[in-house]
């Protein structure tokens, strides 16, 4: 009878164990679309079986096994970081691109053409008041075009400050969420088996990876420590160490909780914050500097040339045509002085009343004045640089969207596999590397072919 | 010429799609597609003046850039995954590198 009771008890236990298995499966199905959720498996442990000694065997429930792999999660998060960065760059640079019209018909190139044409007209009738006024008007248009370009870049830069503030707030918010989950893990060791909590944690980690580059280190109690830029603590256990933005200077500075400057660790490192810092502190100032240089050299050359001539009354010009403040930005402050039409020095000093100086101004259009380039070419080079940067950013974005998808697919394929069973496939993976090597070689050949055709 | 470039671009786009889910088999299957793409471009003249053809070549170049990134991403993933598997199966060397795997031998006797 004892044996029968034991068998019945075993059967009941087994049913309970399988009941738990079904409950785990049900939970997996119910959470199939829950962000951050990873499948769980109920492990089964066999009980000793010695009938002669009254040990009747059976099964008992072992620990819940998560299909989550830290390597696979990290692979997805790495790609999410780069996607966040690519999205930010593509969005911001797309706002800059329309500011640079390289068709030559409008914007700075169009205004420069009109300016040099106006002096060409002035050379035909050097003492005509209307032609003189037209030259001043054309100069105003050049100044306005440079102003518009510079303020456009500055507007994008200011928008970046606003976006950076929001991003920092989001990072600190995510840090608080992760610290709160860590607190659950620390206060209750059974929480490590809670699939819902695990899903919340990994959804927060994945969302954080889109905005900032960080390293996540898992502790033995299940909590995660987060270090932004690789070494600045953001979350340790249930404590957060908020970062802050300093926008008081021309460059955005990110500070850790102790006020240390950690900008260099984050700039360009990935995530939207890395992209914002790179654009705000490097890319946009680079564009603005090149634009300022074109505006300043243009204004100086024109002013210098005019200063060598004489005005309508045969006197050296009393005022320059252009003025600017280099400290505040030559392009944004470029303006025409209150010069009167009669004060335009259209004539050469040795031929008052003539058109020698007007012709000299016209000739500036074709003269290499900035690193071997004319004003229009130098501006075109800057526009070309912006265009290449925008194209590169869009290509990065397209590739990153595919790469995130690829990493997610790889995670789905590899999650929960038996590492022992997979290890047996290592040979197959080695063959895959050889295939990749061959693929890269063929791809190089194809790319070279296309480049040679396009040339 | 334009049709050939479009076919080449189609082959590269197929590689791009395949690499979204890059199993070792898929990677191997990409080679013939790229070879076909090269074949399609053999007769295309250099510096084409046709704007449509030039646009198609630009788009092809763009696709190739994305494919390159996908291949690099895939290779990086499998390199790391192989390390994970190797250490799981064979442990680490004293230098901290994954230990070499020794494939189990088998003998088949008939008769």
Image (cartoon, coloured by chain):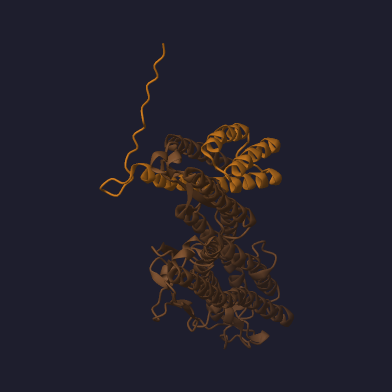
Chain colours: A brown, B orange
- At which x and y percent is residue A3? 47, 43
Camera-side residue: A69 or B12? A69
Residue at the outermost top position: B111
Closer to the camera, A232 or A378? A232
Report x, y in % for residue A241.
43, 77
- Position of the N terminus of chain B, as image quadrant, is top right
Query: Which quadrant of the figure contains the C terminus of chain B?
Result: top left
> Looking at the image, is A157 positioned above or below residue A37?
below
For this view, does A302 lie left or right of residue B99? Answer: right
Residue A42 in picture, x, y percent from top left: 51, 51
Give the quadrant of residue B104. Answer: top left
Residue extending furthest toward the front = A1
Residue nearer the viewer, A187 or A235:
A187
Instruction: Locate residue A242 relative to residue B32 in the image: left or right.
Output: left
Residue A403 in the image: above or below residue A131: above
Residue A129 visible? The answer is yes
Between residue A357 and residue B81, name the one nearer to us: B81
In the rendered image of this protein, does residue A237 appear above or below residue A270? below
Q: In percent of the image, x 63 and y 33: which residue is there?
A: B40
Q: Is residue A366 visible?
A: no
Q: Position of residue B69 (x, y in %)?
A: 52, 49
Q: Residue furthest left?
A: B94
């Amino acid at each position: 009878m004892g044996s029968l009771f034991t068998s019945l008890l075993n059967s009941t236990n087994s049913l309970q164990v399988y009941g738990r298995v079904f409950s785990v499966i049900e939970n997996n199905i119910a959470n199939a679309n829950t962000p951050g959720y990873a499948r769980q498996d109920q492990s089964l442990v066999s009980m000793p079986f010695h009938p002669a000694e009254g040990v009747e065997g059976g099964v008992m429930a072992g620990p819940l096994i998560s299909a989550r792999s830290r390597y696979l999660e990290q692979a997805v998060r790495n790609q999410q970081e780069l996607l966040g960065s690519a999205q930010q760059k593509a969005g911001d640079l797309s706002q800059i691109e329309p500011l640079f019209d390289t068709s030559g018909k409008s914007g700075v190139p169009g205004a420069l053409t009109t300016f040099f044409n106006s002096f060409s007209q002035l050379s035909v009738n050097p003492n005509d008041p209307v032609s003189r006024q037209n030259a001043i008007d054309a100069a105003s248009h050049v100044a306005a075009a440079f102003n518009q370009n510079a303020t456009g870049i500055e507007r994008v830069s200011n928008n970046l400050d606003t976006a950076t503030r929001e991003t920092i707030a989001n990072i600190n918010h995510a840090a608080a969420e992760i610290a709160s989950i860590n607190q659950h893990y620390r206060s209750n060791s059974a929480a490590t088996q809670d699939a819902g909590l695990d899903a919340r944690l990994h959804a927060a980690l994945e969302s954080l990876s889109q905005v900032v580059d960080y390293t996540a280190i898992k502790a033995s109690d299940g909590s995660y420590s987060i270090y932004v830029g690789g070494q600045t603590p953001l979350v340790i256990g249930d404590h957060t160490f908020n970062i802050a933005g300093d926008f008081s200077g021309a460059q955005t500075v990110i500070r850790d909780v102790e006020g240390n400057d950690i900008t260099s660790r984050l700039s360009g490192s990935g995530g939207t914050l890395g992209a914002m810092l790179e654009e705000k502190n490097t890319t946009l100032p680079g564009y603005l500097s090149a634009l300022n240089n074109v505006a300043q050299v243009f204004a100086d050359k024109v002013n210098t040339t005019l200063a060598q001539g004489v005005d309508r009354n045969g006197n050296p010009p009393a005022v320059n045509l252009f003025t600017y403040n280099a400290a505040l930005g030559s392009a944004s402050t470029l303006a025409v002085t209150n010069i009167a039409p009669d004060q335009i020095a259209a004539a050469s000093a040795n031929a008052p009343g003539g058109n020698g100086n007007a012709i000299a101004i016209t000739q500036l259009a074709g003269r290499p004045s900035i690193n071997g380039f004319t004003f229009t070419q130098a501006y075109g080079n800057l526009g070309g640089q912006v265009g290449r940067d925008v194209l590169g950013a869009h290509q990065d974005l397209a590739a990153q969207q595919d790469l995130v998808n690829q990493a997610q697919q790889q995670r789905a394929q590899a999650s929960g596999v038996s590492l022992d069973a997979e290890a047996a496939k290592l040979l197959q993976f080695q063959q895959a590397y050889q295939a990749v090597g061959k693929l890269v070689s063929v791809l190089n050949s194809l790319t070279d072919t296309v480049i040679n055709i396009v040339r | 010429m334009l049709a050939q470039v479009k076919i080449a671009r189609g082959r590269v786009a197929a590689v791009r799609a395949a690499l979204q889910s890059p199993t070792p088999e898929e990677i191997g299957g990409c080679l013939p597609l790229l070879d076909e793409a090269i074949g399609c471009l053999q007769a295309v003249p250099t510096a084409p003046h046709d704007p449509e053809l030039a646009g198609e070549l630009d788009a092809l170049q763009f696709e190739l850039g994305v494919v390159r990134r996908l291949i690099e991403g895939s290779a990086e993933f499998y390199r790391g995954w192989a390390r994970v598997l190797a250490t799981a199966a064979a442990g680490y060397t004293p230098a901290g590198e994954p230990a070499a795997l020794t494939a189990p031998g088998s003998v088949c006797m008939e008769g």
